[in-house]
Amino acid sequence: MGGLGARVASSVSTLAPGYFALVMASGILSVGMELRGHHTLSWALLVVCALAYATLGTLTALRIARFRELVADEFRDPRRGFGFFTFVAGTNVLGVRLGMEGAHTATAALLAVAGVGWLVLGYVVPWTAVLGRSERPVVATANGTWFIWVVASQSVAVAAASLEPVVTTGRRELAVLAVVSWSVGAFLYAAAGVIVALRLMLYPLLPEDLTPPYWVTMGALAITVLAGARIVEMADAPMVDVTRGLVAGLSVGFWAFATWLIPALVAAGWWRHVTHRVPLRYESSLWSIAFPFGMYAVAGIYLGRADGLPIVGTVGAAWLWVAFALWSALLVAMLRHLWRTVLRRPAHTPAGPDRITGGARGGRR
């Protein structure tokens, strides 16, 4: 047991801040399966989502308590710091799925937790990881994890928009929160897009640099589409009435751009793994691909319904099974990985780069 305890402690110390992408991927697929009427499968995914959230929340709290300096180092690292926003997004995705079961109190409570986290991290992470650094230029360290800030903002919009039609008090406040966080997320996407594009154009790009979180460039657009579709479906409120048409039109444009990005990201993966033979093995950051896949599917389903675009809904429904296949493969790979590296490895065997943290550690280089 001592050897196992040491291995678990070692893995907790290097737990990736972006591991909550597992919660995000499981939760959004559960939402999609429920929308399509696959209730048993949706429930199974919800159980995985809730268990992953509780487990990762406990491990993260333990890590903060026992390895505070390591956590502080990640907040100061622009390559890793934005991974903490997966906690915000994962919390809201779980809350939205529970709301579909009528547990609106749980949705509201999780939205409150996520909202506070979004506000705090939204100021702390950019300052500690970007503005507070003495090294320049910071743009050289930008990567796909920066778009997780966008995902967190839009997850707040989705949760608020989901609650607004079903509550009797606080409806106007929820409408304001949904529209404001959606707008902030849209502007953040533009800012992150410019910075990451500059990094790609101004600095050498190695195959190892094209890590899985670059798929969040598409996932951030997809959740922006989903948030927009939910805002369009909200009950009448002053903030909704004046923005509904604008949000609906922009959401269609965002969906089109997200669709355009998919072949480009596939080509980038081919260039990384086939052309340059970077080994493809399990790492925690691969969940940053599973979530965009699931979010793209759900966004299409919702947008098709909200804007009366059946072809978009059909694409979303078909893509849902692609996302589920990827999620299933990653889940098997993760469980196998944990069994081989944490549960079975002898105590004297040195830990490799692919422990429970998955090597990439939420976007680490």
Image (cartoon, rainbow, N blue to C red):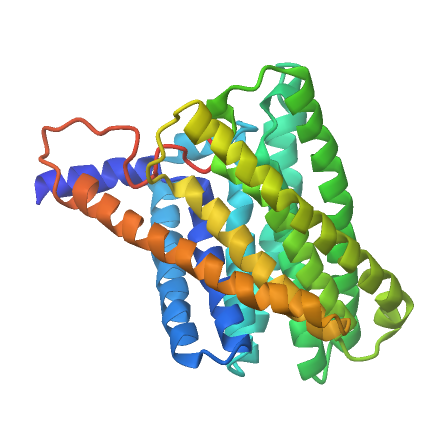
Nearer to the camera, 120 or 30: 30
Query: What is the x, y in percent for residue 324?
Result: 43, 61
Query: What is the x, y in percent for residue 112?
Result: 60, 64
Q: Quadrant of residue 174?
A: bottom right
Residue drawn at (57%, 39%) of the image: 265
Is 364 positioned to the left or the right of 154 in the image? left
- Residue lying furthest right: 242
Rendered view: 209 above or below 31: above
Nearer to the camera, 272 or 162: 272
Residue drawn at (72%, 67%) of the image: 229
Query: What is the x, y in percent for residue 78?
Result: 57, 28
Observer able to see residue 120: no
Query: What is the x, y in percent for residue 80?
Result: 50, 33
Rendered view: 274 above or below 24: above
Nearer to the camera, 120 or 207: 207
Observer able to see residue 20: yes
Residue drawn at (84%, 61%) of the image: 249
Nearer to the camera, 336 or 76: 336
Q: Quadrant of the N terminus?
A: top left
Is 22 positioned to the left or the right of 206 in the image? left
Residue drawn at (52%, 58%) of the image: 294
Is 24 positioned to the left or the right of 252 in the image? left
